[in-house]
Image (spheres, coloured by chain):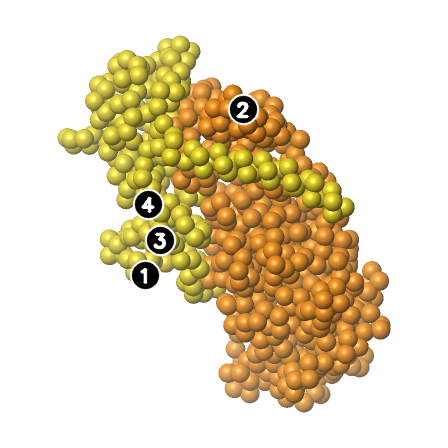
């Protein structure tokens, strides 16, 4: 029995070694490694002395993850800033649709501060109910399924409003929904979320493929742009500032 | 030995992780294919994590960790002491399991055992408990799939300190729950409920746990899943559905380097996407059905007549000494019949909610690791009469100054309810295949029932050291035990030898202190052994590699590596 176990383990571990070697070898070689990510040594396991009757914030959940090292994701203010700059008018007053967009973004992000982290101001009323100090929020909320879900929802639910598509295209310098869905404009859309970065050619190709297929099947420039923007917005890389 | 998944369906295409591994190996060896591209494609397809898991021989079971913080006495329930007639046993005034006395009045207590499934267990195991399907079922049914590991010394007398050590012993780089989350295919890998101040969850791959604060009488399922309930127009929903493949391909292409910085982020994003697309059943009716079931069980348990416990008057004619103490600042209970402490206002807080959440998340295939903490009070809303007057009180788990008589009654009712809930949960898991998954994107990791594929662990940060004078119990961290329930356990198994007498003047007698075990080179069972045992049971890496498990797992069968425990001395 023991021999069988050992035999079964040797081959997978040699393959694991190859896998790790591949990761190590290519860790600095990607075409599109976009960001310099700051890691910090996170000393874990705090004792927040929560009593039996504490019930947490409005949303009813918290995200807990205590790895030794972790990526610094954008906090709730960062997420709101990015989404607002993309989907709200760069200048001028808001119309009703802009207000809806603003409410959607803030509703999904600000109402779920636990998922996104970042300091909150008690006197501004933007902290969860159990927050007692401005330092109570984890400044570096970890990745979580809930955070990803809320961010994806913010993308889809915002872009469900036509005005958000129009605003995004205007903010990108593309123009309007009648603008061509070519690589030049798709790069501009990409750079709404990934400022100063250049997408790889295959990434542009996948977005162009999506756009052309929607255009072909639905004959709608608006829907094609909507899905391209949803794809870019739903990607995770821009969560890392 | 480990069950292996035969293939994975990714974007409608049948792939196989072995093929992926083989292809990757070939690519690395020949460079005929750019290994980076291959790596990226594997990552995009979700195969990388699976490949790593398979390379390590991992296919985890679900793991439910029930933590009863405050450490209530467990002699009436699962702190099994004398399990064989040949076992030595030295009595302690606090260590009692049943009342005794005349035909109408209980005036004494004894350590009464019942023989069930070939071993001696506390009297409570001879009773029938309320069932979710109506009627009653023998509590002893739980023994069929139960294992007790006992005689553990946590080395830490503090509640929080010991609680953290039992879930993450010193020196481990991850918790067993975190390792389960690391390798699961389910969309909410880990959920913790009410464990904030004793949270030790740690994943090697940065997989998060959702820390949910269970709310009384609220639809906790809806609260937990609200972030995944998307609000978009039917037309956008249809459009996204129509172009789902291309949309995913574009997102995956954009995200391909994200995993370099955080594999957890990519996995979380994929899981979120699947949950958003999949939608949910009617969570209102689901919650009402499951929560209602556990609420009824507990309600029945609180009003049940339990033989040997509350089927006769308790205390009449007995001197109200320290054995009737409720708490140190309340004094002796003077209720003429101690049973009058239990009223229609008596409750067990959050037990129904936590069990309902656990059953839902497991049987719907959402979660692989669930850690929940029971209330800090055994019973709330007790009517307590004392020489200073009457009041409504809660009896806390940490029963330093709760006398033997009060404790025997209250704890027996609490464990009667807990046992009923545990039995109900296990019965529910037996009806669901292990392949259950909330998101239909991969093949199941195991065969058989969900109960065979689940390990439920119940315990506290430590057990209690009983005062020989019967006035209460203290922190028995050197006599800690845990109970495990699973369809893969053919019980009852009781592992770990105990000392018949501690030799301690205040805490003498048999109450759970360990003794050297011959199979462990005459060592006591330690926290490292506990972590290794958990890891073996759930089929993940041993996070405490210098320590051995007290079981091995052959396929779907847990085999003990220690003989049935004895009380020696």
Query: Which marked residue is nearer to the observer: mark 3 or mark 4?
Result: 4
Percent x, y for residue B387?
55, 87
Q: Are marks 3 and 2 on the same chain?
A: no
Residue placed at 35% from the left, 13% from the top? Answer: A220
Look at the numbered discs 2 and 4 and tell me whether their residues touch, using CB distance below 8 Å. Answer: no
Give the numbered dot on residue A138: 3
Q: Are marks 3 and 4 on the same chain?
A: yes
Q: Is residue B410 visible?
A: no
Query: Which marked residue is nearer to the observer: mark 2 or mark 4?
Result: 2
Query: Which marked residue is nearer to the observer: mark 1 or mark 4?
Result: 4
Q: In the rendered image, which residue does mark 2 sit on? A: B30
Shade representing chain B? orange
From the viewer's perspective, is B313 left or right of A205? right
From the viewer's perspective, is B126 left or right of A82? right
- Point out the tag, 3 or 1, that comes first from the N-terminus: 1
- Secondary structure under tag 4 reads loop
Give the alpha-carbon distance from disc 1 to disc 4, as whole Å: 29 Å
Q: Are marks 2 and 4 on the same chain?
A: no
Query: Which chain is drawn using yellow?
Result: A
Give the numbered dot on residue A39: none
Query: Which marked residue is nearer to the observer: mark 1 or mark 2?
Result: 2
Give the alpha-carbon distance from disc 3 to disc 2, as whole Å: 47 Å
């Amino acid at each position: 029995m023991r021999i069988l176990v050992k035999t079964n383990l040797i081959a997978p571990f040699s393959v694991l070694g190859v896998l790790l070697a591949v990761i190590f070898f290519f860790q600095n070689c990607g075409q599109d490694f976009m960001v310099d990510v700051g890691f910090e040594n996170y000393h874990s396991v705090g004792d927040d002395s929560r009593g039996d009757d504490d019930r947490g914030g409005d949303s009813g959940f918290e995200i807990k993850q205590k790895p030794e090292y972790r990526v610094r994701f954008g906090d709730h203010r960062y997420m709101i800033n990015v989404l607002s700059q993309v989907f709200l008018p760069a200048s001028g007053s808001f119309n009703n649709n802009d207000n809806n967009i603003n409410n959607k973004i803030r509703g999904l992000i600000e109402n779920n501060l636990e998922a996104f982290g970042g300091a909150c101001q008690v006197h501004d009323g933007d902290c969860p109910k159990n927050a007692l100090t401005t330092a109570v929020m984890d400044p570096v909320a970890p990745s979580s399924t809930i955070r990803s879900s809320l961010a994806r929802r913010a993308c889809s639910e915002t872009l469900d409003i036509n005005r958000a598509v129009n605003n995004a295209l205007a903010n990108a310098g593309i123009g309007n929904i009648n603008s061509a869905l070519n690589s030049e404009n798709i790069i501009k859309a990409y750079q709404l979320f990934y400022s100063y970065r250049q997408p790889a050619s295959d990434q542009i190709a996948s977005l162009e493929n999506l756009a052309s297929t929607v255009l072909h099947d639905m004959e709608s420039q608006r829907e094609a742009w909507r899905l391209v923007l949803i794809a870019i917005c739903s990607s995770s890389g821009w969560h890392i500032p | 030995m480990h069950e292996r998944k035969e293939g994975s369906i990714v974007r409608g295409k049948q792939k196989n992780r072995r093929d992926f591994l083989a292809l990757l190996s070939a690519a690395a060896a020949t460079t005929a294919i750019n290994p980076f591209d291959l790596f990226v494609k594997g990552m995009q397809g979700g195969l990388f994590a699976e490949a790593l898991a398979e390379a390590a021989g991992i296919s985890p079971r679900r793991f439910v960790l029930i933590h009863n913080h405050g450490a209530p006495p467990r002699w009436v329930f699962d702190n099994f002491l004398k399990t064989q007639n040949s076992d030595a046993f030295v009595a302690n005034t606090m260590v009692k399991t049943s009342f005794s006395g005349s035909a109408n009045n209980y005036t004494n207590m004894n350590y009464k055992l019942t023989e069930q499934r070939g071993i001696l267990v506390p009297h409570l195991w001879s009773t029938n408990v309320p069932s979710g399907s109506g009627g009653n079922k023998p509590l002893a049914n739980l023994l069929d799939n139960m294992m007790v590991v006992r005689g553990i010394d946590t080395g830490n007398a503090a509640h929080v300190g010991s609680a953290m050590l039992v879930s993450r012993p010193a020196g481990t780089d991850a918790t067993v729950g975190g390792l389960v989350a690391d390798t699961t295919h389910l969309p909410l890998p880990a959920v913790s409920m009410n464990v904030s101040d004793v949270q030790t969850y740690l994943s090697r791959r940065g997989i998060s746990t959702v820390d949910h604060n269970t709310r009384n009488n609220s639809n906790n399922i809806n609260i937990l899943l609200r972030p995944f309930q998307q609000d978009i127009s039917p037309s956008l929903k249809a459009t996204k559905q129509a172009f789902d493949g291309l949309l995913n391909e574009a997102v995956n292409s954009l995200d391909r380097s994200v995993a370099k910085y955080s594999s957890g982020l990519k996995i979380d994003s994929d899981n979120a996407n699947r949950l958003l697309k999949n939608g949910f059943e009617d969570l209102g009716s689901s919650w009402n059905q499951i929560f209602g079931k556990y609420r009824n069980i507990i309600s029945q348990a609180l009003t049940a007549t339990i033989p040997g416990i509350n089927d006769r008057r308790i205390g009449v004619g007995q001197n109200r000494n320290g054995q009737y103490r409720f708490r140190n600042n309340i004094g002796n209970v003077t209720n003429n019949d101690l049973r009058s402490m239990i009223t229609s206002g008596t409750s067990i807080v959050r037990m129904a909610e936590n069990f309902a959440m656990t059953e839902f998340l497991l049987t719907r295939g959402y979660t692989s690791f669930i850690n929940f903490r029971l209330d800090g009070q055994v019973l709330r809303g007790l009517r307590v009469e004392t020489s200073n007057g009457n009041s409504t009180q809660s009896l806390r788990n940490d029963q330093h100054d709760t006398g033997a008589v009060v404790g025997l009654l209250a704890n027996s009712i609490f464990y009667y309810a807990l046992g009923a809930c545990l039995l109900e949960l296990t019965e529910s898991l037996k009806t669901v295949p292990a392949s259950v998954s909330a998101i239909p994107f991969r093949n199941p990791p195991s065969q058989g029932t969900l109960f065979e594929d689940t390990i439920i662990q119940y315990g506290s940060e430590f057990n209690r050291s009983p005062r020989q004078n019967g006035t209460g119990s203290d922190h028995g961290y050197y006599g800690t035990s845990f109970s495990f329930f699973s369809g893969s356990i053919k019980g009852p198994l009781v592992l770990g030898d105990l000392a018949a007498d501690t030799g301690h003047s205040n805490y003498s007698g048999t109450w759970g202190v360990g003794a050297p075990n011959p199979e462990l080179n005459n060592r006591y069972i330690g926290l490292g052994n506990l972590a290794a045992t958990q890891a073996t049971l759930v089929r993940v890496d041993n996070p405490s590699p210098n320590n051995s498990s007290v079981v091995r797992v052959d396929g779907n069968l847990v085999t003990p590596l220690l003989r049935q425990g004895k009380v020696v001395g």
